[in-house]
Image (cartoon, helix red, strand yellow):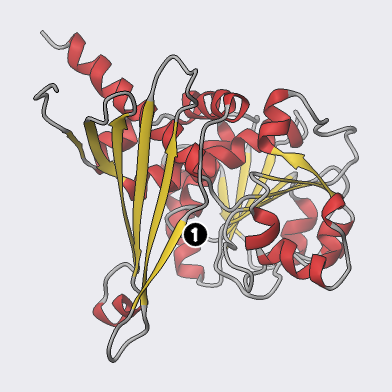
Amino acid sequence: MSDTPIVIIDAEMTIAGLPFRPLVDELQSAFSQGCVAPVRHHHNMEKTGEPDATLLLMPAWSNPDDGDQYLGVKLVTVVPGNSVRGMPGLTSTYMLYNAVDGRQLALMDGNVITSRRTVATSALAARFLAREDARSLLVIGAGRVASLIPDAYLAVRPIEKVAIWDINIDNARVLAKALSDRGICAEIVSDLEQAVGRADVISAATLSTKPIIKGDWIKSGTHIDLIGGFTRKMREADDAALALSRAYVDTREALHEAGDLVQPIETGVISENHIQGTLADLAKGLVQGRGSAGEITYFKAVGSGLADLAAAKMVYKNILAADRQRP
């Protein structure tokens, strides 16, 4: 076995290895090709004097006939008690292996992998579902993931104006200024109903447990992108928004994990048949995306090991290519 050392890739290097337009293209290829991605593992970690923590393991590896053979595992710690410590509640690390011989190849920043592949996955869905002339984007939320949404969408649509709404207006101001300083037309909005009614694309990345996007507010031709809700209790859009939309998911697991789908299915508002297909179905051309300019489309993602592996491979290959170009 080779003694080649593990490549340690920090957050800055991971970001540099994941430019959005190439990342969206890489994800399209990955969803079309597929990989082996077992259901994520949840392990409860009992705590004394604070809420229990969780360890998540998200493995994925190449199909046996793929030319490149990689194995990746994302390890995520979720520690709610960190809120009183003034520390982030979630930390993740990604380990990439050679799937042929099991060699460890690289250790990289899992937080960057997660956030960038998340918004790039939404941008990939928008490539199939948003109108080609979509120019106005409403971002709901202003956190780490939400702040990346405009750049991801600019990679696939001619976005000219970004509106930002957040429950904390100071957070919205910070994001709007950061975008404006880079020459992106951005504004803060306080009236969410009006902002939803004007947007060509609505992308939400929040931890809301109550719907904040109402179907009655949405104009024809809008694309709805729900990033934030990742548990059965979380909701970002109401039943009406889903019922009037042509709806898709990143993976079928979303039907059992995301409150935006689980709740309306359980109450009979829709059936699972309301979902037109997955992102893999779209990438392979097995289902139709947007059918007309006036349709309302809807995409719900919960994240996947496939997208993590695709992003990690891209980072690793870009690092190797950069090393080869150095004198």
What's the residue at 54%, 49% (across, down)?
Answer: 303
- Picture coordinates of residue 55, whole percent (x, y): 36, 64
Q: Nearer the viewer, residue 174 or 34?
A: 34
Q: Which percent across, then down, holds residue 276?
A: 82, 42
Q: Is residue 326 above or below residue 53?
A: above
Question: Judging from the image, what secondary structure is the residue with disc 1 in?
Answer: loop
Q: At 75% across and 70% down in the image, what residue appears?
A: 263
Quadrant containing the C terminus is: top left
Please name the amino acid that badge 1 sits on: Ala
Q: Is residue 184 visible?
A: no
Q: Is residue 21 visible in the rendered structure shown here?
A: yes
Task: Tell me: 155 left or right of 313.
Answer: right
Where residue 281 appears, as percent x and y from the top left, is 72, 32
Residue 218 is situated, as x and y percent measured from the top left of the image, at: 83, 56
Location of residue 42 (image quadrant) = bottom left
Q: Quadrant of the N terminus?
A: top left
The relative height of residue 277 versus residue 217 in the rendered view (above or below) is above
Occupied quadrant, residue 84: bottom left
Q: Residue at x 65, y 30 (%)?
A: 158
Q: How many marks?
A: 1
Q: In the image, 254: left or right of 48?
A: right
Figure quadrant of residue 130: top right
Packing grade of label 1 (10 A; few <14, some 14-19, many >=20) is many
Q: Which residue is mark 1?
A: 142
237 vs 242, left or right, is left
Q: Is residue 253 above or below residue 77?
A: above
State the residue in front, 131 or 123. Answer: 123
